[in-house]
Amino acid sequence: MEKFEGVTGPAAPLLRANIDTDLIIRIERLVGTGRSGLGGFAFEQLRKLPDGSDNPDFVLNKPAYRDSPILLAGPNFGCGSSREGAVWALMGAGIRCVIAPSFGDIFFANCFQNGLLPIALPEEEVRRIAEETEGSQGAGRTTIDLKRQVVTTPEGRELPFAIDTRRRDALLQGLDDIALTMTRQGDIAAWQARDRAARAWAWDSVQ
Amino acid sequence: MARTLFDKIWDPHVVADLGGGWSLLHIDRVLLHDLSGARALNEIKEAGYPLAHPELVFATPDHAVSSAPGRTSETFAGGARLVAGLRQRAAETGVRLFDLGEDGQGIVHVMGPELGVVLPGTTLVCGDSHTCTNGGMGAYAFGIGASELKHVLATQCLPQRKPKRLRIRYEGTLPQGVSPKDMILHAIGRFGAAAGTGHAVEYAGAAVRALSVEGRLTLCNLSIEMGARAGMVAADDTTFEWLAGRRFAPKGAAWDAALAHWRGLPTDAGASFDRDLLIDAADIAPQITWGTSPEHVLPVGGVIPDPSDAPDAARRAAWTAALDYMDLRPGAPIAGTKVDWVFIGSCTNSRIEDLRAAAGILRGRHVAPHVTAWVVPGSERVKRDAEAEGLDALFRASGFEWREPGCALCVAANGEAVPPGARCVSTSNRNFVGRQGPGARTHLASPAMAAAAAVTGAITDVRRMEAA
Ligand code: SF4
């Protein structure tokens, strides 16, 4: 996983409730394309007009936000499909942090497997960051500091955010989850031996 | 201490306490499909990990295969490579694969319960958000992403935080013409698309106990559309009767031992939940969605809402965009909206009972001339059972296309799509922007409501048709 310590840049506001992972990346792109190369397809149904040209009204098409590393979103961002391609597409489009009032559970877990930081802040705060950014025509920078667990808004306000310790440490160090679980192989074997005795039916029925 | 069904499954599956609220959870069964499964098997090979327990893993192609009559894995060229990869890697690793045309093939969440792979009291994952469907068997089943899937394949375990407990009780009796699909859409409309986030949901109450296994699977299927990774219904005699004799269900003395275990799993009287919600089943009407989130749902007699009535700014923005995408006008009744397509299928509503419910409306009637109507059975087994009952002939005679099992129009990942701008009543679970194809407009409903829309060519209250 890619390490993540922090990021600074304009925060692009996309303040709509329930943005689902189908909208972030269309399934057809995942049938045909590998992990890389998805960035150009992120939000394509919002980013493009039906004739294939860029939609000038879509936030990530506006000059001030083209290179935003931070996305501001509405509640329940990333709901829907479990496709991890949604995270790969966002990262491919240069996004390293999403700030929203709440997230879909599977998307949230997928972020931490890849080095994208989802931050939950109250809706009011997300809106204020958007206003501060837009008030400066996109020139205002938002800074994320994961070690201190602080978001610094364009006007310099410091907003602390909560994050699970295990997940924060994994991001800071770029840890490989599977390797960690592999160190527990003794525990797993012991559990399975006990379970095979207690619930033989759960094992034998698929032999 | 009184414990819930969820606690009774979760707690004994904890292999190790990882600290900080994290547990290493044992996973008893893994389902793979052609999209996420083929990729995961390739990636784990590249990473150099062998499969921890291939005998606990079951695979089938469903997403990226054509549903056209007479299809092969090559019919949709875009998915051919995925199916080929799944076959090759399953053969190399010893994972059981149920291939096209074989008994057992089907939509992964239809196939798992039907083969007896999903058992009460077990834990199950799949790289698919609708894995929650399988909770209808009384299992703890949840969807995961690609990285977590690799993790389970390599270790048979997954580090997890225990979700909170949410119970939704449906008391009373469902009115005529109202289905399990309406029960869950009603709850999503009332509590919202994020009401279950961070929770494992148990559906309980008299109206749930009265449901068939198929109905419980439908109910649990939309848990993720309420934000919950997992939904479940306690297994009971209905479940046991349905499960007995299925291919991978325990047999003989093992069945008796399993049954003794399963009978101890239901939530104890007095067990507490973090949240407990109550619905009177008698209040539920047939539901239809109007927008682009499953929470954008109405009773079929309702009117399309006005964004100025939205509860907050983020929802106002979403409602406005949804009405624009769906080409609908606030204040107009939803019933009577003209439809172009009808799709009966998906892991929500493609089981034999769903097909029977739709057929009940179609008998002696015909699809409106301007409507294209498809029925896609959820699995090879459902297809064969339906054909044995003559349902295929009935669907064909009424003007439906009878197709091959798979995800088909639910997801448009297989070369099949509702055309841009066309309006489709669908028995699937997602009305997201572009879900059924770029520009496609989706209205979610029950199989009977979908059949009624096909016949009348418009969104119609199925209860009126039954009375006719
Ligand atoms: S039918 Fe639809 S929701 Fe179900 S598994 Fe297939 S694509 Fe997913």
Image (cartoon, coloured by chain):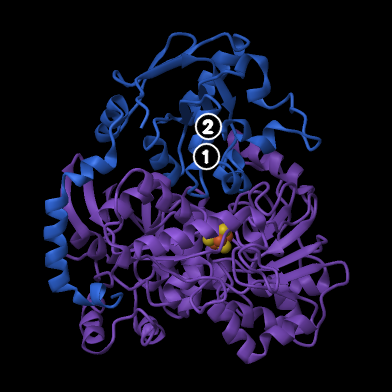
Chain colours: A blue, B purple
- Camera-side residue: B11 or B381? B381
CA separation in Å, label 1 and label 2: 6 Å
- Camera-side residue: B122 or B301? B122
Relative side of B416 to B332, left or right: left
Q: Position of residue B76 (x, y in %)?
A: 66, 59
- Quarter of the image for the N terminus of chain B: give it: bottom left
Figure check: A116 above or below A86: above
Q: Residues within 10 Å of mark 2 (few under 14, many from 20)?
A: many
Q: Is the residue under label 2 in contact with that under label 1 (CB below 8 Å)?
A: yes
- Camera-side residue: A52 or B84? B84
Task: Give the residue type at disc 2.
Answer: Leu
Q: Position of residue B42 (x, y in %)?
A: 42, 50
The label shown at residue A86 is: 1
On the same chain: label 1 and label 2?
yes
Task: Give the residue type at disc 1.
Answer: Ala
| Residue bearing mark 2 | A90
Judged from the image, the secondary structure of the residue bearing numbered disc 2 is helix
Give the residue at x 41% y 41%. Answer: A110
Q: Position of residue B246 (x, y in %)?
A: 39, 83
